[in-house]
Image: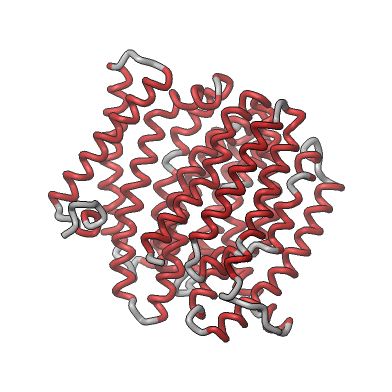
Amino acid sequence: MSTRKNALYNVAYRVFSVFLPLVTAPYLSRVVGTEGVGLYSYAWNISHVFVLIGMLGLESYGVRAIARVKDDASALHRTFSEIWRMQLLVASLVLLGWLGYVFFFAGEEKAIALHLTMMSVSCLVNLDWCLMGLDQFKPIALKNTAIKLLAAAAVFAFVQGVEDLWIYAFAWSLATLVGCLSCWTTLRGKVRVVPVTWKAALAHFKPCAVLFVSVLAISIFRSMDKVMVGGLSTMEQNGYYENAEKIIFCLSGFITAIGTVMLPKVSAMFKRGEADRVRTHLDASMQVVMCMVCALSFGVAAVAQDFAPLFFGEDFAYSGTLMIPLAFTLIGMGFANVVRTQWILPQGKDHIFVTSVVAGAIINLMLNFLLIPRFGAAGAIVGTLAAEFCLPTVHWLYLRKELPHGRLLRHAMTYAALGLVMLLAVRLADTLVTVEGWLGLAVQVAVGAAVYGGLCLLLWIKTNNRAILRLIPGMRK
């Protein structure tokens, strides 16, 4: 399957994975209130940390390892069997740890946490890393989409109040497990389990653990933010932060999907010694990603305060205020993701990735401890912004002699300038147009899309940007 089709399937699936909970969010927010949303967020994010430990960095290491041997059947079967055996051991230990937490340490979130147990069980059977290494993105997207639609339907049918939060947890937890199991049929005939030794299996532990340090560090300024807001402030503040971050997380699915598709492709290109071709791909990808994330960042910032009370209910109006600065994390996230997935990880330069995210996590933790007790959710956002922009800064320090960071940064600055013009145009439209509610919001979105799209098209034509123009039907040269 072509890279473009893989990207489309993966973007659709990644966005859909967070879009469905987003669809249920307005209903859930009105049914359980700010404290209910905050309580569920607290339990889910603790569960997510256990899931990350259970997968031990396989989302990066496993994809890369399979991509490197996919053309050698014998090596493919052996590598798959070794990694999965190691995965089963780690995931089993993590499952025991999760059950220990639920029964001996969980507080008011215990009932919800218990029904999230299948999230940890899914780590035993999650072989998505193998499918992605084989460029099999379509079955992951289609099967998981169908399963999660059923989960969303269950939420609307059975969650009627805060006392039903366990049903919400159970539905999404079960969907995760069934989704992992459903993709096994796709691997039939492509890989098989062969006898391997524990020594060979555990040889994958160290490189996985190295990448896991970075995965865990990322979770500190993604998932742990909400755990810290709930612990250091109030569940109400965590409810505001959860809904604000939910929108941004949904939009970040575009970034993650592009990086996930490019990682196996670029890994194979490096193996063939095509470093110059990789640089060309990286430059084009950075343009596409910066165009996209600047539109999303400035667009969300422009409409956030009108959107939040309409979407989540008036009780969550403060989530709109939080979304404004939080939206700009997408720019740092997008820049770092392109460099990481198309240069750092394909070459096995894991130490750069690990150093960057550990530095970001440390900065985030320090700022969270200082600011959350005083400012609540707003303090967490300051830490998140600092962390997200720390990553590309560390990448630059290591790679300034290998990559044209000046050129890459100019891409970001160019689209950020266009995004700022769009933001001003949207705010002006808001003051001039008298309609309110969803119609008023639709007008703002239309104005923003027209202004940003028009400016981008003029820029691409004026600079004869073939990397972008060839992607537009009717303008290929």
> Is residue 317 in view?
yes
Residue 394 is left or right of residue 195, and the answer is: left
Residue 458 is left or right of residue 68, and the answer is: left
> Residue 335 at x, y = what percent?
39, 54
Q: Quick one: quadrant of the N terminus?
A: bottom left
**Quarter of the figure with residue 457:** top left
Q: Residue furthest right?
A: 104
> Is residue 393 in view?
no
Residue at the image point whose x is 22% and y is 57% from the top:
470
| Nearer-the-camera pick, 211 or 354 | 211
Residue 167 is left or right of residue 184, and the answer is: right
Is 190 located above or below residue 229 in the figure?
Answer: below
> Residue 352 at x, y = what percent?
48, 67
| Nearer-the-camera pick, 176 or 226 | 176
| Nearer-the-camera pick, 59 or 136 | 136
Is 175 located above or below residue 75 in the figure?
Answer: above
The number of numbered discs placed on residues in the rendered structure image is 0
Q: Quick one: quadrant of the C terminus?
A: bottom left
Q: Residue furthest left?
A: 462
| Nearer-the-camera pick, 271 or 216 | 271
Residue at the image point whose x is 60% and y is 46% from the top:
148
Is 50 located above or below residue 443 in the figure?
Answer: below
Residue 39 is left or right of residue 310, and the answer is: right
Q: How was this image coloured?
A: secondary structure
Residue at the image point whose x is 72% and y is 55% from the top:
120
> Residue 310 at x, y = what percent?
49, 22
> Residue 11 at x, y = what percent?
44, 52
